[in-house]
């Protein structure tokens, strides 16, 4: 038990380093990149105290140079997943009883390790394995993961401080218990920070986790495990099992001790998992918590009073940074006819100035998309847009997978607001623009275009409106109330920062439990109320019963 009401260090966002030519951080990350490029890293499974090498392996290939091998990772069999669950439950016996400040210290240490000695290894692994330029790697695998770890500690302390009132002669207390069982974390390829946060946020709250990383994030997943180990996460508290996603998931969901899922990835996968949980519901000892942040079809909507250069910049950054592979990336844009010629010129100028290639060459703004499946999908949508009658390619449209999976940033113009690329999540550097008529424009016409935005897709993750007219901004804020969980006014729809813009969407974009907030942590606890009465009653009769 604690012997003091401890204050945790005040969380601050990790400063983003510049990596400008000549800076020490640039030199260090490039040297680390070279080392990792040639290291042939071997990624085991982490089960309890063991690093398991099953011998059944797959190679890790950088998306921007797919013939090069930077390592291998071992694949789990069903028995390994079952062992991971057993080890997690064994570890739970001590971990769930450990004082909160000890757990906090471990994850604060992990943040310091990432901010300091591991920073460039995290960044280089993310640059190589997920094809991110140094800035995109830095804001993800250095800064955002530190922010998650530090802010979650602060939020945990705030939660624990929330206590009920007590009346005369009683003391009411609430205890924030971890879930009874284990938490299953499934993570996507696109953010190293999310991969680190999904198992660690649950573990911070006293839970044990079985973590299945994405096949396309194995290099940085390995570095995360190294950090967790060095920070002092005890054996069995976070177990990493790589392997066939369906087999791993089916094995986990068959366990009566499955207590919750912390998922980030695509919508159909999450819906499939939810259905399986429903089917298994009678097996479980407790109702599992189901938390999933999923797909998006994020919009930019400009009012005729918007500033054309600002709109163009929101498109260039919002749609194309990290090759459009952010769940928040703008992929459908609605522009007024009166501004379109000017915005078009600015966007074309921007896109034509982008350099594309390996992240090792830091002059490249654009790198490769994650894998061949993604490349082929994007190429087929571009080909279709080139042929379809109601679409034209404004800029970009070329692709080449001879060395790496390179898709040129592409702008499609459509006359159909329901064209397939206005509705389907492509998850790549392709944005579609619909130009609306703003002749004799008024608030009814603005309401109509807002309604089109609202009704166009099944998703509701992020969205941005740009407007110089406050009434129009207010009207859109109201009309688009359910169209985005993260709604931006005069900004791009990407770039949420932990502690500042809690992130998540509704409709088919997820359960909106807002990663990097107290709301998320609440999903990993089960409150116990303890009422203590100091002098208990000795007579059942109440005064009203008197003659
Ligand atoms: P994905 O759905 O392909 O994979 C996510 C995870 O699920 C991976 O670990 C994968 O191995 C696993 N998986 C795949 N098929 C599975 C199955 N049948 N059963 C169980 N697990 C399975 O997603 P991705 O390509 O890694 O990531 C991109 C997707 O993630 C996009 O849809 C994007 O919008 C979404 N995303 C959302 C957020 C958010 O906060 N809303 C954040 C990041 C990414």
Image (cartoon, grey):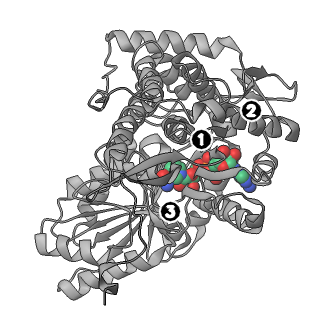
Of the 4 image quadrants, the one containing the N terminus is top left
Residue 351 position, x and y percent, is 38, 46
> How far apart are the two marked residues, 3 and 2, measured between alpha carbons?
29 Å
Residue 347 position, x and y percent, is 33, 52
Q: Which residue is mark 3?
A: 511
Residue 500 position, x and y percent, is 28, 45
Judge whether residue 403 can be spotted in this image: no
Q: Callout 2 environment at 10 Å: few (<14), some (14 to 19), or many (20+)?
A: many
Relative horizontal placement of residue 37, taking residue 468 as reference (left or right): right
Q: Is residue 478 above or below residue 354?
A: below
**Which mark, by number, is residue 189?**
1
Under 8 Å from ligand 1: the CB of mark 1?
Answer: yes
> How far apart are the two marked residues, 1 and 3, measured between alpha carbons?
20 Å
Task: Kindly indicate whether the residue at mark 3 contacts the one at mark 1 (C-beta within 8 angstroms).
Answer: no
Of the 4 image quadrants, the one containing the C terminus is bottom left
Which residue: 60% across, 15% down? 36
Relative horizontal placement of residue 348, taking residue 419 as reference (left or right): left
Out of 295 and 80, give the one closest to the viewer.
80
Q: Considering the numbered disc 1 on the image, is that residue within a helix, a strand or a loop?
A: loop
Residue 144 position, x and y percent, is 40, 35
Q: Which residue is mark 2?
A: 87
Q: Considering the numbered disc 3 on the image, is that residue within a helix, a strand or a loop?
A: loop
Judge whether residue 505 can be spotted in this image: yes
Out of 18 and 143, give the one closest to the viewer.
143
């Amino acid at each position: 038990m604690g012997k003091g009401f401890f204050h945790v260090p005040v969380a601050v966002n990790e400063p983003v380093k510049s990596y400008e030519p000549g800076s020490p951080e640039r030199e260090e990350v490039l040297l680390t990149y070279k080392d990792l490029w040639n290291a042939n890293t071997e990624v085991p499974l982490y089960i309890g105290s063991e690093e398991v090498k099953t011998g059944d392996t797959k190679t890790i290939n950088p998306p921007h140079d797919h013939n090069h091998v930077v390592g291998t990772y071992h694949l789990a069999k069903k028995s390994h997943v079952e062992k991971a669950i057993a080890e997690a439950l064994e570890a739970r016996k001590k971990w769930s009883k450990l004082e909160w400040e000890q757990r906090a210290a471990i994850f604060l240490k992990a943040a310091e390790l990432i901010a300091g000695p591991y920073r460039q290894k995290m960044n280089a692994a993310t640059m190589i394995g997920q094809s991110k330029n140094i800035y995109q790697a830095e804001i993800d695998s250095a800064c955002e993961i530190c922010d998650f770890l530090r802010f979650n500690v602060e939020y945990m302390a705030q939660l624990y401080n929330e206590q009920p009132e007590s009346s005369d002669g009683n003391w009411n207390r609430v205890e924030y218990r971890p879930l009874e069982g284990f938490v299953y974390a499934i993570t996507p390829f696109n953010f190293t920070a999310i991969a680190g946060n999904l198992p660690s946020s649950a573990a911070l709250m006293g839970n044990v986790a079985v973590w299945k990383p994405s096949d396309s994030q194995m290099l940085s997943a390995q570095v995360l495990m190294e950090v967790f180990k060095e920070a002092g996460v005890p054996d069995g508290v976070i177990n990493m099992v790589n392997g066939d996603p369906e087999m791993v998931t089916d094995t986990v969901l068959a366990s009566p001790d499955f207590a919750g899922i912390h998922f980030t990835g695509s919508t159909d996968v999450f819906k499939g998992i939810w259905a399986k949980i429903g089917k298994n519901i009678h097996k479980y000892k407790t109702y599992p918590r189901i938390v999933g942040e999923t797909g998006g079809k994020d919009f930019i909507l400009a009012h005729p009073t918007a500033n054309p250069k600002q709109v163009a910049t929101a498109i260039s950054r919002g749609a194309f940074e990290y090759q459009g592979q952010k769940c928040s990336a703008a992929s459908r844009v609605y522009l007024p006819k009166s501004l379109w010629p000017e915005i078009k010129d600015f966007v074309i100028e921007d896109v034509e100035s982008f350099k594309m290639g390996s992240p090792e060459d830091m002059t490249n703004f654009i790198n490769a998309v994650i894998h061949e499946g993604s490349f082929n999908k994007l190429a087929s949508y571009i080909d279709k847009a080139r042929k379809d009658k109601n679409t034209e390619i404004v800029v970009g449209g070329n692709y080449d997978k001879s060395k790496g999976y390179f898709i040129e940033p592409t702008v499609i113009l459509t006359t159909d607001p329901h064209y397939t690329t206005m509705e389907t999540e492509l998850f790549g550097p392709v944005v579609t623009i619909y130009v609306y008529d703003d002749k004799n424009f008024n608030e009814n016409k603005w309401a109509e275009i807002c309604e089109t935005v609202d009704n166009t897709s099944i998703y509701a993750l992020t969205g941005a409106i740009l407007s110089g007219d406050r009434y129009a901004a207010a009207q859109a804020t109201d009309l688009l109330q359910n169209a985005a969980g993260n709604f931006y006014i005069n900004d791009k729809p990407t770039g949420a920062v932990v502690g500042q813009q809690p992130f998540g969407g509704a409709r088919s974009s997820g359960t909106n439990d807002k990663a990097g907030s107290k709301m998320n942590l609440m999903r990993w606890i089960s409150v116990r109320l303890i009422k203590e009465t100091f002098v208990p009653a000795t007579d059942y009769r109440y005064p009203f019963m008197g003659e």
